Image (spheres, rainbow, N blue to C red):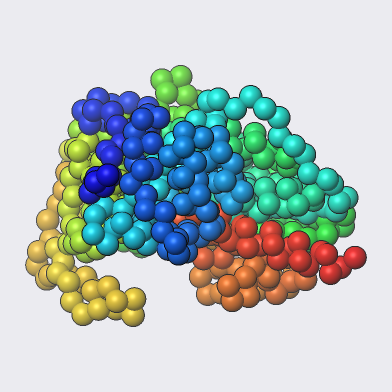
Amino acid sequence: MAINPKKHEMPVQNAKERAKNFKEVALGYTEALAVAEANRCLNCKYSPCVKGCPVNIAIPDFITKIKQNDFEGAYEIISQSSSLPAVCGRVCPQETQCESKCTLGVKFEPVAIGRLERFAADWHNAHFKGEVVLPQQNGRKVAVVGSGPSGLACAGDLAKAGYKVTVFEALHLAGGVLVYGIPEFRLPKEIVKKEVETLKKYGVDIQTNIVIGKTFTVDELFKDGYEAVFIGSGAGLPKFMGIKGEGLKGVYSANEFLTRANLMKAYQSNAQTPIMHAKNVAVVGGGNVAMDAARTALRLGAENVYIIYRRSMEELPARKEEVEHAMEEGVKFEVLRNPVEILGYDNPEDNHDIKNGFVCGLKVIKCQLGESDEKGRRKPVEIAGSEYILDIDCVIMSIGTSPNPLIKNTTKGLEVNSHGGIIVTDGGAKTSKEAVFAGGDAVTGAATVILAMGAGKTAAKEIDDYLRQKV
């Protein structure tokens, strides 16, 4: 049978319609599409795709189950390695990980592994009626700080190994960046809720509204009988450029803007949390978070939304699919541009340029690419005299985040690097403090969901090894 050279397209909402609602953009494969896509898999002897997966899912095995119409069997295989398959199938950059290693991709488009993972997880969530089998308990307690991807992955693996795991979450809902950062139209919160509920069935206890370092410290957790602590508190401290005008009304970090829209439902008419419904919005940055912020601003009613990025389209770090979706929805890309000042005026009814009050414009300068930096990326070089002003009433800064220093400042003996990331053993999760492990964005700074999950799984194994030796 001849192999289809292209992936089967993902059904999506119409671009004009979806730009005005918060419903999920990608609609998911039907059973027929999933089987047809699974049949493109060559079932390679050496499974290079598995090596490209940070959590080492047995990819050819679960795809074979889909070929056989055994969709629950596919889910069971995935869930042996991943605690959040419905999430990862939606937001992981498979194109640079498992799919980039696909043998079929040498000649044709690779197998749509992520879409198939999502299909299997969604099928399970819609059809599974059985009960989770609780693992045998070993009577030992482990604390997990943070309920984002790394924390949930670590908690899931430890619970399945028989540990009594308590997850402490600072916000009022579990999920971390999955609920406050990623928009509903890309990751429905009901999906996250189901994944969390599955972990609870394995015995994971999740306590919300508890800020470790403030409500109580890591050291106090040990006094409460926890024998090990995993820190997966993420990187929620936003960065700014330090340019004039960043204190104006109408300037947000992407973190705040998305948290208001996602976690606090500010887009709803009856929401108690306010958010600016701006006419002209500039989002500074070129990553996935910038795309999320730009597309959210569109859905809040903005007429013009600009991505301001200092390098070219070729260097955009965001996923290709997210960039394409943003373009289809009407987001404008101002590349090789760098902000130099945010302009403001005193009263939104006025139209004069007083440098305080509300945002009224963004001064940007044109750039060109120069020599490569230490990471191999060409440095943007500003072109003198090329400044111009964009008519803007809201600016969203999406230029990265760093770990909050609260845990570091309240935990004796916990070493961090110059960026505030917790220092761990090379390739591992052990910190400088006895019985304390860490992973995900709290270590690396902002990264992908699947890399954070991989770090959580690594930590779970190291915690298990550590506690087995400490009888």
Which residue ends up furthest to the top in the rendered image? 270
Kindly indicate the quadrant of the structure image that contains residue 45.
bottom left
> Is residue 163 visible in the rendered structure shown here?
yes
Tell me residue 399's x, y (percent).
Answer: 36, 58
Tell me residue 23's x, y (percent).
Answer: 37, 27
Q: Residue at x 81, y 64 (%)?
A: 467
Task: Look at the picture and state if 196 lies above or below 318.
Answer: above
Q: Nearer the viewer, residue 205 or 45?
A: 45
State the quadrant of the C terminus.
bottom right
Q: Residue at x 78, y 44 (%)?
A: 135
Q: Residue at x 36, y 43 (%)?
A: 39
Tell me residue 388's x, y (percent).
Answer: 12, 56
Q: Is residue 436 left or right of residue 77?
A: right
Q: Nearer the viewer, residue 266 or 460?
A: 460
Which residue ends up furthest to the right in the rendered image? 471
Task: Look at the picture and state if 379 lies above or below 315.
Answer: below
Which residue ends up furthest to the front in the rendered image? 1
Tell me residue 235's x, y (percent).
Answer: 52, 57
Task: Look at the picture and state if 455 lies above or below 361.
Answer: below
Q: Is residue 274 left or right of residue 14?
A: right
Q: How many labels sit on residues?
A: 0
Q: Nearer the viewer, residue 244 or 182?
A: 182
Q: Nearer the viewer, residue 94 or 451?
A: 94
State the quadrant of the N terminus.
top left
Q: Residue at x 36, y 58 (%)?
A: 102
> Is residue 251 visible in the rendered structure shown here?
no
